[in-house]
Image (cartoon, rainbow, N blue to C red):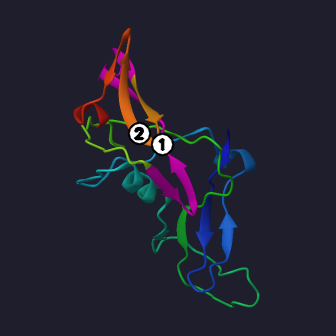
Amino acid sequence: LQGRCPHVLSCPLCGWRETLGGEDDAMFTTLHPPTCRDAEMYTSIQACMDAYLRSEVVDDGYVWEGCSNAACGQRRRRPTLGRHMEVFPELLCVKLNRWGPDGVYRRHNISPTDRLLLQGSVYTLQSIIVHRGRANSGHYWAVVRHVVQGESRWYVNNDIIRQEATRDELT
């Protein structure tokens, strides 16, 4: 169930990549993508994962001697830094936090999507674990996909109650 998603520096000219960190630094069983960036709140799991995997140009303060690809010869150009999925797990667990990187609570309305596309691999959403409450107390329940004759229906499983999910329970 483990995947591997290291940080990588990439040459903007030829695409050569250098993996950063040790072998174990990039292993995961659960991914924690951002739910927002600055003032922008993401509205789907796909948007959260796209932001998690997005590469950005490294700032001016980083000194890069250039691409190690001898055929490229690129020197003194700023590389991009991002994540690259090297090992795709059979089962992907994604945790969406309600707290931003600054520690401030942010209520999000992220809609689940049936399919999640990650760098060419497709995942199908099967269930959602929901927590309501505070960090030190609250209640968990699950929203689970049930497929009957090719049609998907979502059900809330909350203690001893099982009922079809409303749209509000899926966000």
Q: Which residue is mark 1?
A: 32
Q: Which residues are magenta?
A: 115-141
Q: Residue furthest front?
A: 149
Secondary structure beneath dot 2 equals strand
Q: Residue furthest right?
A: 70
x and y, in percent, of residue 163 in the image: 32, 20
Mark 2 or mark 1, earlier in chain: 1
x and y, in percent, of residue 141 in the image: 38, 20
Q: Which residue is mark 2?
A: 152
Image quarter (top left, top right, bottom left or bottom right) of the C terminus: top left
Residue at the image point whose x is 62% and y is 53% from the top = 5
Q: Residue 104: in sight, yes or no?
A: yes
Residue 155 numbered mark, or none: none
x and y, in percent, of residue 45 in the image: 39, 48
Residue at the image point whose x is 57% and y is 74% from the top = 63
Q: Amino acid at mark 1?
A: His
Work out how far the residue at label 2 is from the one at label 1, CA to CA, in angstroms.
26 Å
Residue at the image point whose x is 66% and y is 71% from the top = 17
